[in-house]
Image: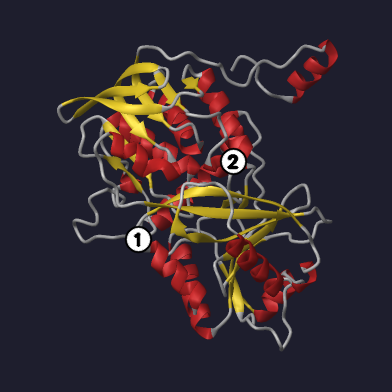
Amino acid sequence: MRDRYSALALARHAMTGAAWPRAWRSAEPKSTYDVVIIGGGGHGLATAYYLASRHGITNVAVLERNHIGSGNVGRNTTLVRSNYLLDGNTQFFEYSLKLWEGLSHELNYNVMLSQRGQVVLGHSPAQMDVLARKGNIMRLNGIDAELLDRGDVQRLLPYLDYSTQSRFPIHGGVLQRRAGTVRHDAVAWGYARAASALGVDIIENCEVTGFRREGDRVTGVATSRGPIAAGRTAISVAGHSSQVAALAGLRLPVESHLLQAFVSEPIKPFVNHVISFGAELFYISQSDKGGLVFGAHIDGFNSYTQRGQFQQVQTAAECAVALIPSISRLRLLRHWGGIQDMTPDGSPFICRTPLANLYFNGGWCYQGFKATPAAGWCLAHTVANDDEHPLVRHLGLDRFERGNGHDEYALGLWTYRQ
């Protein structure tokens, strides 16, 4: 890289007063590229980086209609984990977590991985059976998992509600110690910087308005900054997947919903783990600045807005206080929303499409951020080789036609609703 980040570089800049160079080049679009990636979020940037670093394809453009970090990569609760139940998803998310563990070194950029551990709580004997099953599946796949009884949880998380009057008594939980959080902005900036250093053009404020086609073959895109020819094109635009795919004539089994996230005013270190509330889809952790970061269900209606709805604010706050009564007097500092592209079975798509030279990555539901490195890795492989990576062969667009849905969403929510 032009200016590798290090302690020596920091000292040199401090002594000379020289300004740090831009983290990535502000590129102007060229008329043609080997690969065009639509979407400058975490997945799109990761795909560009792995195309350049692993496949030697550097004539790549990443087209972002706003600025880098303006989409879902900067609008999430920063959680990373691999405690999944279904075969296929288990291996994929474990591969992603392993990539997270080496990412700061890989990118020469501190993504602030904090492997503080995640505890999924169980509130009934039925839930504990499901958590034991999940833990066993994880361990059979070489993934760390520990089943906790009530006493174990109380020693680890003494601030939860263990009273006899508790509406949701805690029976135990399952702990993945390698799970944790990552600074989402750093992920976008780190991948953008590393990809740009390898020759990738990152083009901001460039909206794709259509596709150029020759029969059933995609040959490029039309943009707000002019037409661009491409040997291969990949769609990776999160909540706007169905809209962008429709420009190419594709109808996706995807709905877009708002998912809100929240942060409280800062307090002293208190919540040292990521906690998932088994009584409802709710999760909470504490940021480095001291705020409690939490989220809950998607809003129940389709929307492309990034503004929150009061009903979900109330539900999330109720879950927080039911789980940790001592935070009832904390003030909510802010909340925000990301647009989730929800599939019928809660599993994503990373695959070729019916149109030649067009590839798709989307439908991530609640799982998009934690999948960032592996999604980029697998999509880069798929684009470079015109063949799906073995880790995502089960995540094709045609799986519903074949009656082969991958229903992680239903199994996951079943755990919460017992």
Q: Which residue is mark 2?
A: 74
Q: Which residue is mark 1?
A: 345
Q: Residue at x 62, y 21 (%)?
A: 23
In the image, is residue 327 above or below residue 222?
Answer: below
Q: Residue at x 44, y 43 (%)?
A: 238
- What amino acid does circle 2 point to? Gly
Q: Quadrant of residue 20?
A: top right
Q: CA distance from mark 2 to mark 1?
A: 25 Å
Q: Residue at x 67, y 15 (%)?
A: 21
Question: In the image, residue 367 lies at what x, y percent?
Answer: 48, 53
Question: In the image, residue 137 lies at what x, y percent?
Answer: 43, 66
Q: Residue at x 67, y 66 (%)?
A: 317
Q: Is residue 348 left or right of residue 357?
A: right
Which residue is at the front of the view, 67 or 94? Answer: 67
- What amino acid does circle 1 point to? Asp
Label 2 environment density (alpha carbons within 10 Å; few <14, some 14–19, many ≥20): many
Task: Classify mark 1: helix, strand or loop.
Answer: loop
Can see residue 308?
yes
Which residue is at the front of the view, 109 or 346? Answer: 346
Q: Earlier in the sequence, mark 2 or mark 1?
A: 2
Question: In the image, residue 414 lies at what x, y percent?
Answer: 44, 73
Looking at the rendered structure, which numbered label has been put on residue 150? Answer: none
Quarter of the rendering occupied by the N terminus: top right
Task: Classify mark 2: helix, strand or loop.
Answer: helix
Q: Is residue 121 left or right of residue 367?
A: right
